Amino acid sequence: MIKLQMFFKVSEGKSEDFERMYSEVYVAALRKQKGYLGSELLRVFPPNVSKEIGAAPMEYKYQMELAFETEDLRRRWTRTPEHDEAWNAAMALSTRYEWIGYDVAGLDQAVPYQTQFGIADAEARIKSVQSSEPVKLDVWNSRVRNLISPNATLDCLAKGFQFLEGPVWDNTRGCLFFSDVPGNTKYRYTLDGRVSVYRKPSDNSNGHILDKQGRLVACEHHTRRITREVGDDIEVIASTYKGKRLNSPNDVIMASDGSFLFTDPAYGLQPGLGGPAKAELEFKGVYRVPPQGGEPILIADDFDAPNGLVLSPDEKKLYVIDSGKKHIRVFDVAPGWIITGGKVFVEVKDDSNEIPDGMKIDVDGNIFTTGPKGIWIINNRGRLLGRINLPEVAANLNWGGPDRNILYITASTGLYRITTLTKG
């Protein structure tokens, strides 16, 4: 991925008009360009840029970042008819406001490329906590004691985020990747207790997995697609269905044959979570992308808000959360990906407004799902076994660590972990 940065100075009182023009005119033109991945507008206050360009206290400094799939596509963009519309929009911005300079990922040095801009600020807000307290476990069935030790502790690893999602453990790199969706930042937690920014902007990424080659796969709200890191490039796995853009892919899993299964609710169309944007599809679906790639295959389109999903260990059952209806549904999976059923497996609700969101399954088929007041534990027959109480609303979870017995939980403003007696 290649990032083009442009810098502007905008006098006080004109920032609102500048931001409107950027969103309604410039970005609208950019979206027509092949190879364009997304953009972000940031208020710029990095010391070395400010020192070089100079700016009065009452001048807003803006950094505009445009992301392209490759440098070749970025350069080709300047030589295509589609570029004319975007270029005219850029010139209109430059005429009305003071254009300072540009840079392309260190290749062109009009203004030195700020690899850490935005990252230092994001990291400064995060507080490594390392606090610990006994797990507060609601025991609804004694079998939950085989999964959670009475001596287990809930460890808070970091605080200060906006709303965390999508944890996935990378054993090769010895770290946990997770994302702050409204913070538009992807983070990395290492076993030495350090939290650092992995990617910013993250295109409001949500769910993550690793593919069979250990490459990071992400559900991106802003770009409305599922992507995979291939070296320094980004490969698109899914972005449309029958010619229409997906809503905002939320969570994704990978089957043993290499198929990707994912959910596509509309949360990411909202301002601050990837939007504002309008839906092109009339439903919120669950899909499968075949191992060889290609058009997503629709599994179900009758969900209010499809969210977390898991396959049973033998891959004969597919479980999918419907956050809107506060329950988990189960589908039968036959050879050749013949999927039938879809009945309600279990309700995950109480008298509060909290909803089930993300879920994972252990090696024995027990489901751990986020829900009201914490993590609900359910066996493969739909029996409620217990609940791990949490101090804040949890969005997702995943096992990690060298032995895959550490349950990492992304819960609103904090990152937590519990060592379990089972493995994921």
Image (spheres, rainbow, N blue to C red):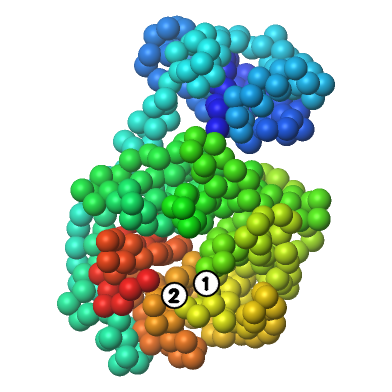
Q: Which residue is mark 2?
A: 361
Residue 269 vs residue 424: left or right? right
Vertical relation: 254 (above or below) 335 = above
- Quadrant that contains the N terminus: top right
Q: Disc 2 on helix, strand or loop?
A: strand
User: Is the residue marked by circle 2 packed among few (<14), some (14-19), or many (20+) residues within 10 Å?
Assistant: many
At 48% across and 57% down in the image, what residue appears? 212
- x and y percentages locating residue 266 in the rendered image: 66, 57
The amino acid pointed to by label 2 is Ile
Dot 2 or dot 1: first in sequence order is 1
At 57% across and 66% down in the image, what residue appears? 257
Vertical relation: 357 (above or below) 38 = below
**Can residue 171 be seen?**
yes
Q: Are marks 2 and 1 in contact (CB under 8 Å)?
A: yes
Q: Which residue is mark 1?
A: 310
At 73% across and 66% down in the image, what residue appears? 298
The amino acid pointed to by label 1 is Val
- x and y percentages locating residue 351 in the rendered image: 50, 79
- x and y percentages locating residue 141 in the rendered image: 35, 92
